[in-house]
Image (cartoon, rainbow, N blue to C red):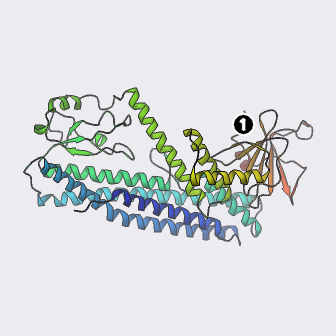
Amino acid sequence: MSQLDEEKLIQQLIELYRWAFEQILQIIITKEAKGHAIGYWKDMLKEVYDILNQLDEETRKWVQQVIGQVYSQSSAETWAYLNNLGMAVKENPGFAQVHQKAIDVVAQNMVVSMHESFQFIGRRINDVFRQVALEETGRKMASGTTIKDMKQMVIQRLLDQGHTAFVDKLGRKWRLDSYAEMVARTTTREAASAATINTCREAGLDLVKITTHYPTCEKCAPLQGKVFSISGKDKRYPKLTDEYRPPIHPNCRHTLQPYVRELDPDADKVQKYSNTSLTKDPRSEEEKKAYKEMRDMVTIATNRRRAREVLYSENTPLVEKVKAAEKLKKSYEKSGTRPVGKDAQIIKQYSQYLDNLKLGKIVNIDEKSGIITVEGRSIPRKALPNGIVDLKRESGKVEQRRFYDENGHAKLDIDLTDHNKPWFHPVVPHAHDWVKGKRSKKWRELTKEENELIKDIWSDD
């Protein structure tokens, strides 16, 4: 039996989800903004749902192809393991239905999990479209060039909120491609565990052992290296319940192996260890530190990979690329290393771009929101398209937040100061609109939506 390249198959699925991300982004960005807001929104939403439906169908095909292969390979490996131990065991044809049922259950669970994520994201995009359309209608923006404003708000809102973000049943937020990767890795490990358990049952074995890895997390540490009874009938060992069956958590490395007590010279020692706490973390401080360092390295690598995806995408808005370049730069700062190769080139490229904008002294670029903070007396009227720039004065506080349109021209100022003229600016914060390239001297109160735009730097408390 040829060795299954499980990692390659998982990467194929991840690439499929990244393709969908690009397609959805391209639809939102390139669809011409014209006509009536409702018609524009419905047409765009239909195209997005077409992509999600296609993704749903391709996921089903992947599951049908891969899960059975993973299960069969794990079963074959278990038989080979038992044969290497010199055990005279034969396959039982009557177990074929047991194996097929296990494959079907694991596969269906993955299909359902991913289908729920598509529905969630479809609803989220729908909600964003509706909310933006409602806000724009409230501002008496109906059609023509105002649809372009609405389109840009949709793009920014979805990117800010993460239009590929899925919230699972535990309230954890995932990017859709990361969620697909987690589900794929978890499901293939579940298939492997099910195959090992059922093959052991077929061979008449009741004991399995969880593999050991260093360093490991606090959840797996109390379980690894321990022996469990599949049926629970062997009272010398704890019963293998779902709680203790690998994968213990998403992206878990642990697996199950058949265990034959009679062939283990340390059987008594292993039995005693298997009956110690299944929840208390036994790791040393050294191992905890090593695990944290390993996870930090994974996080840095993930952040860099995601930043590169944005930076090399043709469809991503410029402001998102600036954010990604900053995230890439800070990943090197956090690791205490200098960027090299293409990373160094692209970080330098975006730094030069910002310098050319002559924004002033840049003191921070928020890698999540993309908001640029500058120190000085004023902010330029032209900056990056759809950008946001904060002005920090001598007080050390942000006194103004400026928003730019899709061409990089100032369109709105939110001032968080009375400019030392409380008789003229009795309301703080307040807004000044930009009209035909000039800032209106007339101030106005903020809308509900505009108040949301400054909640990170302003509180009424």
Q: Is residue 387 shown to the viewer in this render?
A: no
Q: Position of residue 337 (x, y in %)?
A: 56, 41
Q: Depth check: give the residue in front, 311 or 198.
A: 311
Q: Depth check: give the residue in front, 404 or 116.
A: 404
Q: Quadrant of the N terminus?
A: bottom left
Q: Residue furthest front?
A: 341
| Callout 1: SS | loop
Q: Is residue 80 shown to the viewer in this render?
A: yes
Q: Position of residue 355 (x, y in %)?
A: 75, 50
Identify the image quadrant of residue 34: bottom right
Q: Name the residue carrying label 1.
A: 459
- Mark 1: amino acid: Ser
Q: Residue furthest left?
A: 88
Asked if 405 appears above or below 256 in the picture, the reply is: below
* Residue at x 49%, y 44% (from the top left corner): 299
Q: Position of residue 219 (x, y in %)?
A: 36, 36
Asked if 378 appears above or below 16 in the picture, the reply is: above
Q: Depth check: give the residue in front, 206 or 450.
A: 206
Q: Position of residue 14 (x, y in %)?
A: 45, 59
